[in-house]
Amino acid sequence: MILLLTQNFPPDPGGIEALMGEMAEQLVASGRTVLVLADHIRGRGLSEPSWPAGMGLRRFGGPRPIRRFRKALAARRVLAGHPVQGVIADSWKSLELLPRPDVPTLVLAHGSEFPPAASARKARRIGAALGKATAIAANSGFTAGLMGPYLPQDAVRPVVIHLPVAPQPAPDEEARRWAEGFLGGAGPVLLTVARLEPRKGIDSVLRALPALAGRHPGLRYVVAGGGEDETRLRRLARELGVEERVRFLGRVVDRNLKAALYAGADLFAMPSRREGASVEGFGLVYLEAAWHGLPAVAGSDGGAAEAVLDGETGLVCDGADDGAVAAALARLLDDLPLRRRMGEAAARRVRSGFGWETVLPRYLTLLEGQPARGEGPRAAPR
């Protein structure tokens, strides 16, 4: 049995949530039994999905310190009373309250959980948790670099394994009709699918719209996602005079509807930037867009430059520079052949090298290989 410890799990939305849910399903599909210990469902109105046979799930609620303690206690009991072949944790936080497991233990690293200037106490907490792992998988070279100051001398070095993406559905007719209300018309259409927070760079896209619309009168911008930044972004769209060109759809959970948005858009825009300690460690959403043949404009600060290859599958720019964002958007909107070439290259890349059939064996090899403590950094095969 594989024990999966996670704070983030479907049906709650988010990149880590999607990763952990798909990982559980893929492990079961590979013939393994899986037990997931997860936090309670946080989103209002969300219900438990139908999980495959062979996967057990226990959820833990209450205030964060209490649920983390209860989940760690449950994990100890499972490890003591059941034949567990390995443990996979969604981050160092899920290992913190456990004693060092006696089985292979893989911890995933995403980026945002490693602040650039942590207090001494937090640095000790992170280091102690990472020291319990027999393997660490970082989602990008950028994230692996962030971990350096926190790794104890005798800890394993992180291995870079870029995130996998599940096959994306082709939108059905009903979903296409739904999306047509936002995407139909002369175009072109910019699309962002993200949690609405400042580091995603949606405000920079909004500020680029007035000039872009001068060259593309039918230009529209569709934003799918919810978050605390929505009020500010709506106000900014009004102030810029582009409110009629922008549609805020809120969170789009249904995969068919999301696929219809991707299929109907012309360019994916998420020029992420650093905001304090918050930064994009990789960006699974770029791969989802690429699956549907969308080139992307991404930010250079963080791991997005590993999800989007600059000049090949999209453009990478300084997300903190409005001028750079506007120039990247303009270059792709103004050059249809270039946009199509990059979109085709993006689809080829993600479909051939980022599927679970390719990436799951990398995770399992890392989990089962138990690299020696203190060895140098290693790179996963690409």
Image (cartoon, helix red, strand yellow):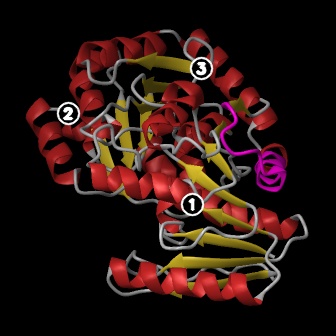
Q: Nearer the viewer, mark 2 or mark 3?
A: 3
Sequence-first tag of 3 and 1: 1
The residue indicated by pointer 1 is: 90
**In terms of depth relative to the viewer, which is nearer, 164 or 157?**
157
**Numbered range of the magenta stretch:** 361-377
Q: Secondary structure at mark 1?
A: loop
Q: Is residue 135 left or right of residue 231?
A: right
Image coordinates of residue 15 in percent, x first then y, are 52, 53
Answer with the quarter of the image where residue 309 lies: top right
Disc 3 vs disc 1: which is toward the camera?
Answer: 1
Q: Three-letter amino acid code at disc 1? A: Asp
Q: Is residue 21 above or below residue 233?
A: below
Callout 2: helix, strand or loop? loop
Q: Quadrant of residue 87?
A: bottom right
Disc 2: CA contacts within 10 A as few (<14), some (14-19) or many (>=20): some
Mark 3 highlights which residue? Answer: 309
Viewer-closest of 10 and 6 = 6
Residue type (three-letter) at the residue carrying disc 3: Leu
| 32 shown above or below 107 | below
Residue at 58% across, 34% down? 140
User: Tag on residue 242?
Assistant: 2
Q: CA distance from mark 2 to mark 1?
A: 40 Å
Membership of 68 in magenta stretch: no
Q: Position of residue 133 (x, y in %)?
A: 63, 56
**Residue at left offset 43%, top offset 10%:** 331
Can you give x and y, in whole percent of width and height, for residue 177 in the image?
Answer: 55, 54
Quarter of the image for the C terminus: give it: top right
Cα gap from disc 3 to disc 1, whole angstroms: 26 Å
Q: CA distance from mark 2 to mark 3?
A: 30 Å
